[in-house]
Image (cartoon, grey):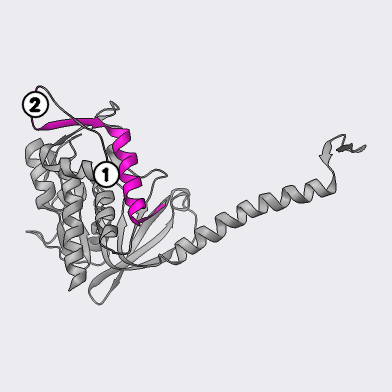
Amino acid sequence: MFQIDPVRHMRFPENEENIMSQVVENTISDAIIRNFAEKFRTNLTLDVAIVGGGPSALVAAKTLADAGVKVAIFERKLAPGGGTWGGGMLFNEVVVQDDAIYILDEFGIKHRELDNAPGYHTLDSVEMASALIYGAVHAGAKIFNSVSVEDIVFRDEKVGGLVINWTPVERLGMHVDPLTVLSKCVLDGTGHPSEIIRLAVDKAKVQLDTPTGNILGERPMWVDKGEASTVENTKEYYPGLFACGMSANNVMGGYRMGPIFGGMLMSGKKAADLIIEKLKK
């Protein structure tokens, strides 16, 4: 089956086998390129573009997709899930309170009520992250990972999309022009930095729906206050621009709350409901 090359002294398949190997390898490459290109092309225009793939964003994506909304998440890192994976200080357990248990049940995430703190449940953070990702994708949301958002599309005094590039391009400082994604609404799920709303303030000079018209900045940890404010601060801050999770807290000056995730999950639900209502109008 093999011949010896007298020059290179290497073993190689005969021509027929070599051709078959190339066909299989090219078929695999062709399938990946064709299918990704189609997925990408058909999501250049969306109802909702979500930036950041943390827990609130994933809940919002599933809720929107379940309602028939065309939605995609653009996540800078290779793995979506945000700060969920590491639990608290790399102890991969997190806590969710009673009010948000129904969301865990929607995603099929197991949980156990704490014996010493009724109303609070502990759960595996890796199971939570993977279940949230699967739930969003299975509902019909698309996730584009390793994609960074470097700007927003701003037309007619409204946020109307994203300017995107590959994360490695951004991190290497390569001079590569970006592409655009148009959407009816943009949801900032970038967490503590509120990166998309920051772009709107710094570059488009918009006035936000906050007491000062600007980003107020996150306050220090106060768990119960932070849980409540995360949901309360989830809203539309400028026409077409919403914030959820810790991004909303940073914009409105809410408190942080650590590895308790009920407020984050409920924030995603609220953001989706607000966007669905806006799209209906």
- Which residue carries the number 1 mark? 107
Q: Residues within 10 Å of mark 1 (few under 14, many from 20)?
A: some
Q: Which amino acid does label 2 sit on?
A: Ala
Q: Which mark is residue 57?
A: none
Q: Picture quarter containing residue 239?
A: bottom left
Asked whether, in this view, residue 238 is left or right of residue 154, the answer is left
Does the segment drawn in magenta span residue 119? yes
115 over 128 or under it: above or below: above
Say above or below: 149 vs 217. Answer: below
Q: In this view, does 28 lie to the left or right of 143?
A: right
Label disc, if present, on residue 117 of the rendered structure = 2
Residue drawn where x is 84% and y is 48% of the image: 15
Q: Quadrant of the N terminus?
A: top right
Residue at image location 75% in from the left, 50% down from the top: 20
Q: Residues within 10 Å of mark 2 (few under 14, many from 20)?
A: few
Quadrant occupied by the C terminus: bottom left
As for residue 203 lying within the magenta part, the answer is no
| Residue 185, image x, y percentages | 26, 66
Residue farthest to the bottom, as pictured: 156
Residue at the image point whose x is 36% and y is 51% from the top? 138
Give the SS element for disc 2.
loop
Task: Identify the amino acid type marked 1.
Answer: Phe
Going from the N terminus, do you reach mark 1 or mark 2 first? 1
In this rendering, position of residue 100 left or right of residue 72: left
Foreground: disc 1 or disc 2: 1
What span is colored magenta in the figure? 116-144
Q: Where is residue 132 in the image (x, y as percent from the top left)?
A: 30, 44
Separation (CA) of disc 1 from disc 2? 24 Å
Q: Can residue 14 be seen in this view?
A: yes
Q: Is residue 149 left or right of residue 34?
A: left
Label 1: state its secondary structure: helix
User: 219 or 222: nearer the eye?
Assistant: 222
